[in-house]
Image: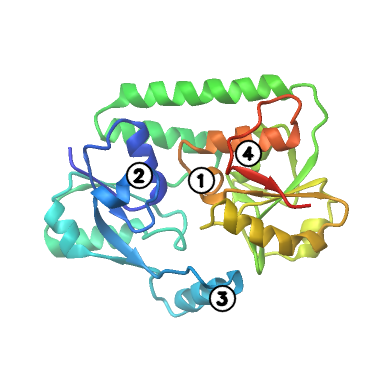
């Protein structure tokens, strides 16, 4: 089977299921594993936002969307040349990837026949379910079951380690300028790690809020997990967040690697968050995962 992934999390899922050799096309943002973007054909491009501030990126995204323009470009000819059997995409977030409708339209125009699987989880349980969906569509359901079982075992270990302990109030800032609160599966990560998510929208889309709204529940710990950034960028942005939460611990987390992409590494994110919330109960996270800012 020839697979094409149109979002970074799907690429990670494919490799986790042992489908790396079957994967023939990826996006310009697929950086895990690093060889994916180097070895595969890039079929989706987009603007390089490095060097832009969070506010500039937000203005750019809102401007494109209000004009009805896409944030990503599908290289249709390259896609057709790959002759894929299965395309992994999403309808969850227009800011994150091309919606599946665009893919269907391109395939019709090109006269290509491929199955299109849209991965649209809103909770951590639903994320795990998408691994089974990909496994079934790719003909390796047993690998998916083994992957989910292994990840669930790690989640169970964290749950046992933090059971009966005091649970701190945790606010998650998914974007800093303007601020966005935690949505989708992110509050589930906090709960699984032994915390109480506040000012959050579990199972719903993340929305723009004010720092006053984020601070109102008096969070004890603030996690800054900006979409599109790894730890270095998260640390820089977390420093600007500190004044809005006097008295709270402020931590930066590798957002792209551990929190915002609905792939297998979300369990790494649970373990890393648990290490922040309960450092005496769980092992310290690997270097490059988290950093305390205040």
- Give the residue pinned by disc 4: 188
Quarter of the figure that contains the N terminus:
top left
User: In the figure, 160 relative to 224: above or below?
Assistant: above
- Give the residue pinned by disc 2: 11
Q: Are marks 3 and 1 in contact (CB under 8 Å)?
A: no
Label 1 CA crowd tier, 10 Å (few <14, some 14–19, many 20+): many
Q: Of helix, strand and loop, which one carries label 1? A: helix
The earlier-in-sequence mark between 3 and 1 is 3
User: In the figure, 137 relative to 185: above or below?
Assistant: above
| Residue depth check, mark 2 versus mark 4: number of the one nearer the observer | 2
- Give the residue pinned by disc 3: 56
Q: Residue at x 47, y 33 (%)?
A: 128
| Residue depth check, mark 4 versus mark 1: number of the one nearer the observer | 1
Q: Are marks 3 and 4 in contact (CB under 8 Å)?
A: no
Residue 173 coordinates in the image, percent (x, y): 67, 55
Task: Determine the CA span between mark 2 and mark 3.
Answer: 28 Å
Task: Determine the CA span between mark 2 and mark 1.
Answer: 13 Å
The earlier-in-sequence mark between 2 and 1 is 2
The earlier-in-sequence mark between 2 and 4 is 2
Q: Residue at x 31, y 52 (%)?
A: 37
Q: Residue at x 54, y 49 (%)?
A: 260
Q: Looking at this view, is 250 or 61 the one in front?
A: 250
Label 2 CA crowd tier, 10 Å (few <14, some 14–19, many 20+): many
Q: Which mark is residue 257?
A: 1
Label 3 CA crowd tier, 10 Å (few <14, some 14–19, many 20+): few
Q: Are marks 2 and 4 in contact (CB under 8 Å)?
A: no
- Asked which quadrant contains residue 109, the reply is bottom left
Task: Determine the CA span between mark 2 and mark 4.
Answer: 22 Å
Q: Of helix, strand and loop, which one carries label 3? A: helix
Left or right position of 190 against 90: right
Q: Residue at x 39, y 56 (%)?
A: 29
Task: Determine the CA span between mark 3 and mark 4.
Answer: 30 Å
């Amino acid at each position: 089977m020839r697979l094409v992934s149109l979002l970074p999390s799907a690429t990670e899922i494919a490799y986790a299921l042992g489908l790396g050799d079957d994967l023939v096309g990826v996006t310009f943002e697929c950086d895990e594993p690093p060889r994916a973007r180097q070895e595969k054909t890039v079929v989706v491009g987009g603007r390089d936002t490095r060097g832009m501030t969070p506010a500039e990126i937000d203005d750019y995204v809102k401007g494109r969307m209000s004009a009805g323009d896409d944030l990503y470009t599908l290289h249709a000819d390259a896609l057709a040349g790959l002759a894929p059997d299965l395309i992994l995409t999403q309808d969850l977030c227009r800011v994150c990837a091309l919606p599946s409708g665009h893919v269907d339209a391109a395939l019709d125009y090109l006269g290509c026949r491929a199955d299109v699987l849209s991965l649209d989880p809103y909770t951590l349980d639903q994320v795990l379910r998408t691994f089974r969906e990909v496994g079934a569509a790719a003909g390796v359901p047993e690998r998916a079951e083994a992957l989910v079982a292994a990840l669930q075992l790690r989640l169970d270990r964290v749950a046992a380690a933090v059971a009966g302990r005091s649970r701190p109030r945790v606010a998650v800032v998914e974007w800093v300028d303007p601020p966005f609160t935690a949505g989708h599966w992110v509050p589930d990560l906090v709960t699984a790690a032994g915390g109480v998510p506040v000012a959050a929208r579990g199972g719903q889309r993340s929305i723009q809020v004010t720092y006053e709204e984020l601070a109102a529940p008096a969070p004890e710990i603030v996690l800054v997990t900006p979409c599109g950034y790894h730890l270095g960028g998260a640390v820089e942005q977390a420093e600007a967040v500190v004044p809005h939460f006097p008295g709270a611990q402020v931590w930066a987390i590798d957002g792209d690697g551990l929190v915002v992409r609905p792939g297998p590494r979300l369990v790494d994110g649970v373990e890393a968050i648990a290490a922040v919330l309960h450092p005496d109960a769980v092992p310290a996270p690997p270097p490059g995962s988290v950093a305390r800012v205040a």
